[in-house]
Image (spheres, coloured by chain):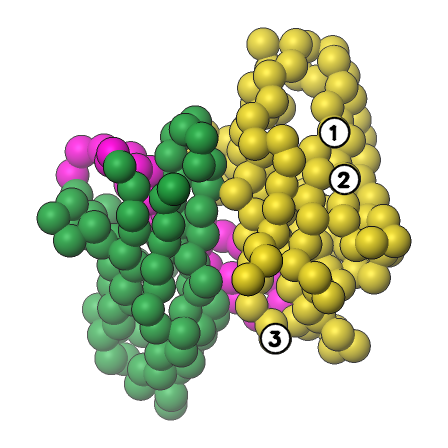
């Protein structure tokens, strides 16, 4: 069965500093990969997705993620965080119609220090 | 540990048929959210429930209805299905408690993949 691991439950970053949120997945083939963000009191928003092709994916709000097959990773990055980036971030794997469906990681809570 | 359970995992229906999707939240979670995600699209918030009452309503079509039962499981009923309803439907649960906003993390189900032909 597929699985997603977000090893960091909480991350604290100073405003203006760079950010990397880790995501590792387990899946037999090349999965569809997603990063979502949930800001306090708001719904879920898709940041970016990887289906195929270029392994460096650009998303909204200045985020990017890189798919590394050899490491089974899909880490989310941002060069300079803003206070409004404080939120819960979820990585997800979709088997694309396969038996495992959509699997989310447990989330990483991002705290921004002034 | 128990997770959010959704059933069925896959569903194939024809146009104009009805479908019922089920979501069983993590025990003691009092809040359930439903989302619809079309291929390659943003998840669309449909509806949420808190303590068996409708809490928020998003872009849920009038053809759809949902409820949360006494055991906190939730069902999404979809009628007069259209081709455009083909999507991944996932639910999430959390423990909101008495606060206006949940500070507890969301837990997601594996989704139900609905195909309308």
Q: Residue at x 79, y 26 (%)?
A: B63
The chain under label 1 reads B
Image quarter hosting the C terminus of chain A: bottom left
Q: Is residue A46 left or right of residue B82?
A: left
Depth order, front residue of B15/A105: A105
Give the residues in magenta.
Answer: A29-54
Label 2 sits on residue: B75
| Distance between the alpha carbons at the discs numbered 1 and 2 | 7 Å
Counting every numbered tag in the picture gives: 3
N-terminal-most mark, 3 or 2: 2
Label 1 sits on residue: B20
Label 3 sits on residue: B103
The chain whose colour is yellow is B
Viewer-nearest of discs 3 and 2: 2
Let me know if residue B54 appears in the view.
no
Depth order, front residue of B75/A21: B75
- Residue B101 picture location, percent across and down: 68, 72
Q: Residue at x 16, y 39 (%)?
A: A54
Q: Is residue B83 above or below residue B97?
A: above
The chain under label 2 reads B
**Residue A30 drawn in magenta:** yes
Let me know if residue A79 appears in the view.
yes
């Amino acid at each position: 069965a597929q699985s997603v691991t977000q090893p960091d439950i909480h991350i604290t970053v100073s405003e203006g500093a760079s950010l990397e949120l880790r995501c590792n997945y387990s899946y037999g083939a090349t999965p569809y990969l997603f990063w979502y963000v949930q800001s306090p009191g708001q719904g879920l928003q898709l940041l970016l997705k990887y289906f195929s092709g270029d392994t460096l994916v650009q998303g909204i709000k200045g985020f990017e993620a890189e798919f590394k097959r050899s490491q089974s990773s899909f880490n989310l990055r941002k060069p300079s965080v803003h206070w409004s980036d404080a939120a819960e971030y979820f990585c997800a794997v979709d088997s694309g119609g396969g038996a495992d469906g959509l699997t989310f990681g447990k989330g990483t809570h991002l705290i921004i220090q002034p | 540990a128990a997770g959010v359970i959704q059933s069925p995992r896959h569903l194939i229906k024809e146009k104009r048929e009805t479908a019922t999707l089920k979501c069983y939240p993590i025990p003691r979670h009092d809040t359930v959210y439903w989302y619809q995600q079309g291929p390659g699209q943003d998840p669309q918030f449909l509806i949420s429930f808190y303590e068996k009452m409708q809490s928020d309503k998003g872009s849920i079509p009038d053809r759809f209805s949902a409820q949360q039962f006494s055991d906190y499981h939730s069902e999404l009923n979809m009628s007069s299905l259209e081709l455009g309803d083909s999507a991944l439907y996932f639910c999430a649960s959390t423990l909101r408690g008495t606060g206006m906003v949940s500070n507890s993390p969301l837990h997601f189900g594996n989704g139900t993949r609905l195909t309308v032909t």
